[in-house]
Image: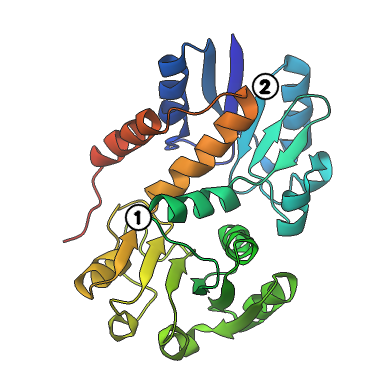
Amino acid sequence: MDVYGLLGNPVTHSLSPPMHEAAYRELGIDARYVTFEPEPEALEAAITGADALGIRGLNMTIPFKREVLPLVELDELADRIGAVNTIDFDGRPTGHNTDAAGARRALEHHDVDVDGARAVLIGAGGAGRAIAFALADAGATVTIANRTEERAVELATAVPRATGHGLDDLNDLLANADVLVNATSVGMEEDRSPVPTEALTRHLTVMDIVYRPLETRLLRDAREAGAGTIDGAWMLLFQGVEAFERWTGQEAPVEVMNETLRGELSGESGAFK
């Protein structure tokens, strides 16, 4: 039996195990996906131990996406982004970033072509970094807005065709934008939006990476303004799909994984009316 898993702290409420195990069952793969919750100071021992035990692959989440960088080989994209969320143990442990592909595939799934688009990204943290590179690599001009403007400017210097701004500029930044992505936790289990309602128009496609609740205040406001909306479960799904395909070499059963993920989310409370 092959073993895959998620390394983070905390990981108690992760939706990755049911999503991945549904895929294993669908394809008849003898595997399990489990969670590991080491203390931060035990991260190096955890990676070494996973390698020694023959674990096939790990996902990484908070607080380890950057801390693991010196402990693994990095592929080109993970090195550019400066964060790892997937490790394979085929040879020396190698770190990848499937968050970027998850964001790109979520947009593609909704027929959003970002090549030549004007994209506004809110947030310059770990997820924001991955999405910024995903948008730029797909041909978008990226405008990064962050609560701390200096962090947005710093990220923009590393991303092609990007500029950094503070949140106070959002209304002006969105006036001519095609795509808006919220890569912050604003709206997670709270009825708040990082975007003034009046800045949302029907010309926008709005993606929120928050998936608890599935329809955040931002997405509800965007829908009421006539904008296209993409909920956070899509990025979560496709980053998992990318990891699954990298580890197994098989095409992921996307529909099964999506049904499982949304079934888990539908059983949770936290939607705001």
Mark 1 packing: few (<14 Cα in 10 Å), some, or many (20+)? Answer: many
> Could you tell me if the residues under marks 2 and 1 are in contact, i.e. CB atoms within 8 Å?
no
**Front residue of this view, candidates 175 and 221:** 175
Residue beneath the point at 44% across and 41% down = 237
Horizontal side, residue 137 vs residue 106: left or right: right
Q: Is residue 103 visible?
A: yes
Q: Which mark is residue 83?
A: none
Residue 197 locus on image (x, y percent) = 28, 81
Q: Which residue is mark 1?
A: 231
Q: Is residue 198 above or below residue 2?
A: below
Residue 222 locus on image (x, y percent) = 28, 71
Residue beneath the point at 66% across and 76% down = 161
Residue beneath the point at 35% across and 63% down = 187
Residue 145 locus on image (x, y percent) = 54, 78
Horizontal side, residue 252 vs residue 260: left or right: right
The N terminus is located in which quarter?
top right
**Quadrant of residue 178 in the image?**
bottom left
Residue 35 locus on image (x, y percent) = 54, 28
Residue beneath the point at 32% across and 62% down = 229
Alpha carbon separation for disc pair 2 and 1: 30 Å
**Quadrant of residue 205 in the image?**
bottom left
Horizontal side, residue 267 vs residue 238: left or right: left
Q: Is residue 188 above or below residue 174?
A: above
In the rendered structure, which amino acid carries the disc numbered 2? Arg
> Circle 2 — which element?
loop
In the rendered structure, which amino acid carries the disc numbered 1? Asp
